[in-house]
Amino acid sequence: MCGIYASIGFAPDPARIDIVSHRGPDGRGWRTFESAAGPVALGHRRLAIIDLDERSVQPMATPEERFWLVYNGEIYNYLELREELRGKGVVFRTTSDSEVLLHGYALWGERVLDRLLGMFSILIWDQRDQRLFAARDRFGIKPLYFVANSHGVALGSEIKQLHGLPGVAARINVARAYDFLSAGYTDHSDETMFADVRQLRGGECVTFDLASWRPGAAPPVRRWYDIPREPGPALSETAAAAQFKELFFDSVRFHLRSDVRVGSCLSGGLDSSSIVAVMDRLLGDDGVNDSIHTVSACYAAKEVDEKPFMDAVVAETRTTPHFIYPDPETAFAAAEKITWHQDEPYGSTSIYSQWCVFEEAKRQSVKVMLDGQGADEQLAGYHGGFHYHQQALLRAGDWPGLARLVMDRNRWHGLGVADQATSILRPRAPSWLKQAAKRAAAPSAAGEQWLSSALMTEAARNGSALAGVLMRDALPEISDIGNLCLAFVKGASLPMLLRYEDRNSMAHSIEARVPFLDHRLVEFDLRLWDQHKIVGGDTKRVLRSAMRGVLPESVRERRDKLGFATPEQRWFRGPLRPLVEQGVRETMDRYPDLLNRAEVEAYMKAALDGDRPVDFTLWRIANFGLWGRVFGLSL
């Protein structure tokens, strides 16, 4: 895992790579070239994971020095590709995945991307043909941002590398700010919250061919990979679980390839627990007796206490556990530092919890951490998916299935049968009745119009963030579990979570790996469509079935949903209340035209006094202003 930078036209500035030294404390490389469009620069900060030898430093060149590579990520099938390339006469100088990638590009060109199993952001300069090629992995696990204007083009691993370049204004993208403040959305578009900075999205690439492209021209971004958009053949639950298990075990096996210590996050949930359990099985089969270092965030508050589930996994695996107990005061004390590393605002204190996990992993000298990101998106693990499952059952007239769903949710999630029946019947009511019910239920409490400033009202005319995701990616309206999973993977959830993961891990010079995002597994899961995901009151049914006999039953059968949660409601109404109030007011002082101040004050008072639930809104408002201050941004 590393930090990378490239520019054409802009004055070469090594500070652009050194600002992300946290991404690569093990080595530094810088190289400049001349081109028809001005100077070309390549920069690299190295985090040594595979082949720790100095010969693997970057920029790395082919023997004739035509192709020059800087890249961030891991190619997990590099050993298999290495053998294939050797069979074609390639001679290797190192044992690194970087050299495999470089020679693969020299032989196959852009088609090498289709052969890669891994996570990556790639920059390759072709000195002979004067081309800069950039690509991002299928799902955007590794970041790649760019600015392009009349001065040139520059690309980097983090937005801060591009901030302050000539022609790049320190200005907020108001449309994306609205998406964040209103719904917590970030990373769902090629636009960022910085007005002049964009990103390559997952599965995209671009070639700057200086025979035709010059600074000021639009970057010719194109898509090299897309997810499957149609259901596959029907499978029995037994067959689906068997295929899932085979793919998942194979993915974890690849993700264990490393020349340094590999550990795992362990929240006690189904996803991270499955990874730890499979790691234990695979390492045992390979004769490896070392224990797996796991790191878990724990809280005394009963509503977010997952330690019994963590303990169950630890008891049944060869694990060296490390438990941390994040405290509320530090959540605000660390917010400025976390925000700088995140580049953009973050939506809740759960990001602080994840920060603390990677902080502890670094203390334990664990350089690679596996994590469970991506499972919920492809397997409909969020409880909001029950709504779409319910509607599909209604359309199919599956009354036994609907009855099972209602009874399971009553038994496992505490939802009343009458309340569920009302929810089921409401969409079937005539439109005049639904409108009357909506008016009757309209909130009358003060503070409901906090987004009613002229600025936010104008931004709202572009539509919701989710609608934007569906439109940009030509996705259908969400009507079933299959379409819901497509939306989550493409933009509605996964890209944001991957940014949080990347920045929190790299801030501590740790490589985070996500085995659920092996593209073979994702494609299989998406093609399941509505099958074996939500069954009755079960989410992620195929994963539960596949992990029978692998996971402790108390974990495999748990039905609540937490992750690295924090007791936010208790914190905000208790020790953090003065800091929350101060943070919200500082945002409104910094950006007086952003929100309706009177309504924000009313909303905040009602939430902190207990007259309405505390949600993530207050944190988003406070963190937005902090972000603007950290990066010196204006509206």
Image (cartoon, grey):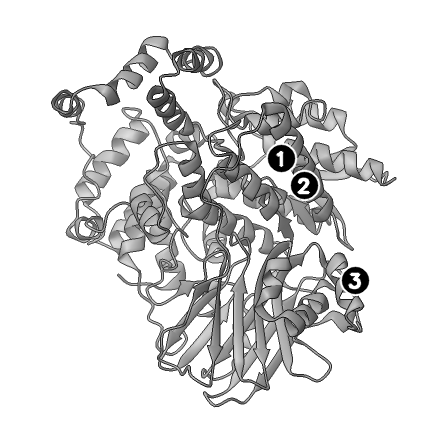
Reply above or below: 109 against 327. Answer: below
| Residue name at image x 45 percent, y 16 percent | 413
Frontmost residue, 132 versus 446: 132
Cα separation, mark 3 vs mark 1, equals: 32 Å
Numbered tag placed on residue 83 in the rendering = 3
- Name which of mark 2 and mark 3 comes first in the sequence: 3
Residue closer to the observer: 108 or 504: 108
Determine whether label 3 and label 1 are within 8 Å by CB.
Answer: no
Question: Label 2: which residue?
Answer: 264
Crowdedness near tag 3: few (<14), some (14–19) or many (≥20) residues, C-alpha within 10 Å: few
Can you say which quadrant of the picture contains the N terminus?
bottom right
Distance from the alpha carbon under mark 2 to that under mark 3: 30 Å
Secondary structure under tag 1 reads helix
> In the image, which disc is placed on residue 6?
none
- Lateral position of residue 289 relative to residue 64, left or right: right
User: Please, what is the three-letter code of the amino acid marked with disc 2?
Assistant: Ser
Q: Around disc 1, counting alpha carbons within 10 Å, would you say few (fewer than 14), some (14 to 19), or many (20 or more)?
A: many
Measuring from the top left, give residue 328's x and y in whole percent: 49, 37
Which label lies toward us, 3 or 1? 3
Instruction: Kindly identify the residue that appears in the image at 66 percent across and 38 percent down.
Output: 248
> Which residue is under mark 1?
272
User: What amino acid does circle 1 point to?
Assistant: Ser
Q: Nearer the viewer, residue 511 or 622?
A: 511
For label 3, the SS is helix
- Labels 2 and 3 touching (C-beta < 8 A): no
Image x and y of residue 498, in percent: 51, 49
Q: Nearer the viewer, residue 382 or 444?
A: 382
Q: Are marks 1 and 2 in contact (CB under 8 Å)?
A: yes
Q: Nearer the viewer, mark 2 or mark 3?
A: 3
Residues packed near mark 2 inside 10 Å, few (<14), some (14 to 19) or many (20 plus): many
> Residue 415's x, y, as percent?
39, 14
